[in-house]
Image (cartoon, rainbow, N blue to C red):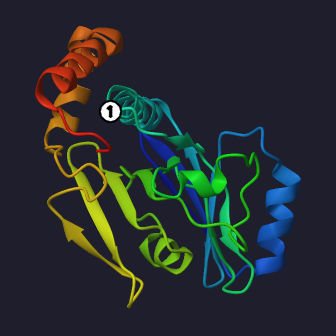
Amino acid sequence: MKTLNQSIAENRVILNPVSWETFNHLLNDLGNQRASRLAYYQGIIEIMTPLGEHEHNNRFIDDLIRAIADELNLNLKKMGSLTLKKDNIKQGVEPDSCYYLKNEPLVRNKQTIDLNIDPAPDLVLEIDITSGSLDKLPIYGALGVTEIWRYNGNQLNVFILDKVTLTYHQSKNSRIFSWLDLKQIPQLIQQSLSDGDTATLKNFRRWIRENISISGG
């Protein structure tokens, strides 16, 4: 069975039923040099191809996270749309962006991450503007991602992992950047559309230097 969701932000194809082995073969056949991002959960594959609005939001929020790390002298390992999967649970996903902060020392010298032996990223960014997309929270929970930022084109929602139940609860605050008013991020995205990315990021960096004196986020 195949379904297709299209919007100005992304195209999504849903395939089922598909075996875990087929999912892995598809990853190998497609290779790393591609725009599409895949997810696998309970026999369902989602193939998402980002379009302009999706990628601008992803890359701009990524720039904000990098700016925070730079200004606060945080060791941040940026892994982009890394394939996150575990063979023993037969689940996998490719986020828009992902980051190591607390666990950065454990993967600092690695160019390849294997979640069968390595820790999951501390933070995942998902841009999810199209309705009807695959719910990826159960996948991230099973993989052990502690915090997820999900932006729907208007609002940024944050989900924090309960490490006992491996489920998420929505939070008004980030655990990683507890000082950050999350309402700023959609506002900054809109500002970038009028003032430009560079000017908006410069102003954000200046705001951090003038207002945030903590060390380590």
Residue found at x 34% / y 54%: 149
Height in image: 50 above or below 197? below
- Identify which residue, 191 or 129, lies in the foreground: 191
**Vertical position of residue 119 compared to residue 211: above or below:** below
Q: Position of residue 25 (x, y in %)?
A: 86, 66
Give percent across and percent down for residue 112. Answer: 76, 51
Which image quadrant for residue 194?
A: top left
- Left or right? Give the position of 163 relative to 32: left
Instruction: Look at the numbered disc 1 and give the secondary structure of its residue.
Output: loop
Can see residue 199? yes
Say left or right for 65 vs 79. Answer: left
When asked about the image quadrant of residue 113, the answer is: bottom right
Q: Nearer the viewer, residue 41 or 208?
A: 208
Left/right of residue 138 with respect to residue 1 in the rendered view: left
Give the vertical position of 39 relative to 65 (above or below): below
Query: Who's the residue at 48% across and 40% down the image?
Result: 75
Q: Residue 186: x, y in percent?
A: 20, 37
Tell me where residue 163 appears, x and y as whole percent. Answer: 39, 82
Quarter the N terminus occupies: bottom right
Q: Which residue is mark 1?
A: 72
Residue 36 to residue 25: above or below? above
